[in-house]
Image (spheres, rainbow, N blue to C red):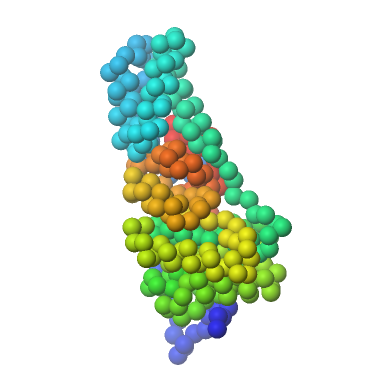
Amino acid sequence: MFKIFKREKKNNLPLPEPAPEELIYATAEKKVSLFSRLKNSLIKTRKTFTDGLTSLLLGEKNIDQNILEEIETYLLTADVGVNITKKIITNITTKLNRKELNDGKAVLDELKQCLIDSLTQYSKKFTVDTNKKPFLVLIVGINGAGKTTSIGKLAHMLQNENKKIMLAAGDTFRAAAVEQLQVWGERNNIPVVAQQHGADSAAVIFDALESAQAKNIDILIADTAGRLHTQEHLMSGLKKVAKVIKKLDASAPHETLLVLDASIGQNALQQASEFNAALKIDGIILTKLDGTAKGGIIFAIVDKLNIPVKFIGLGEGIDDLQPFNAQQFVDALF
């Protein structure tokens, strides 16, 4: 049987501290604006990508083939991807030949607009359908991407919107994954449905959905066992989860979000491709943008898979998961 977790001390021992990837709560430091935080988080990507482009182009009057090749190198180095890089270079070359771009600043502005357009083309915000209650959000991804932490941050965000939240501890295989979710749920007064270590993930989420229906919960966020995208027998477990929960709600899951670690660059694109092949991915949570120079992978993922990025992780703090905005992202990148 499932249980809604209420933590108890055993033998008068203190409650365990959260694992290293557990959420870090806000301190008394003065909060900065979202745009400033985004800009600060993209420092490494900006240094290897847009700072170089800016230095290359600003003040340049003659844009020749050598400069176009340098632009191409900057784009590829930042993991923007071969396909979208080719599109951008072709677009700029065409406009240069038509004399529509007169100098380096005009080229830089055009490049920036191309990047914005590539993201907004498939842009879609995370929206809860209130006609589907509970609205089931399935979170998938490999271990180490920040999956469990992102669940906590997302739950916190939705709780602040006065939504009744429940969590399902469906990652029953990774050591401490269930406990992490339970500790976080206790701290924020959010019920967590869990079973013992090694329990069937699909059964846990099925029980959680049944409980959420009975308790009139608005949103159920379900964790799943982290798995390598290359292991087919593990990926099939995700298909089982989707199949089992449809016995209670034929329309569920209502939103499937894939958590990707931005710092792994092109490997994130491969992961996204494999997970999307196994499940219909509705959106991406891109984490660890603050610690990588490979933030350009966001363009390659959206361009290759036509899947919108819905949230980005800007750090370890409880409020560091933010809805994705393409215009703001590119502005901060430059």
The quadrant the N terminus occupies is: bottom right
Please give left or right for residue 130 compared with residue 61 in the image.
Answer: right
Q: From this viewpoint, which residue is outermost toward the top?
A: 99
Query: Residue 17: image x %, image y %?
Result: 43, 73
- Considering every residue shown, the one lying at the far bottom of the view is 11
Determine which quarter of the picture holds residue 3: bottom right
Residue 6 rendering spot, x and y as whole percentages:
56, 80
Residue 32 appearing in the image: no
Q: Vertical placement of 157 versus 293: above or below?
A: below
Question: Where 147 sits versus 56, above or below?
Answer: below
Residue at 53% from the left image edge and 50% from the top image edge: 282
Residue at x 41%, y 62% (from the top left corner): 235
> How many discs appear?
0
Where residue 140 appears, as percent x and y from the top left, is 46, 59
| Image quarter (top left, top right, bottom left or bottom right) of the C terminus | top left
Residue at 41% x, 13% y: name it: 96
Answer whether residue 330 is visible to the viewer in this image.
yes
Residues 34 and 306: in front is 306
Q: Position of residue 195 (x, y in %)?
A: 50, 79
Query: Which residue is found at the position 51% from the left and 31% from the top?
Result: 117
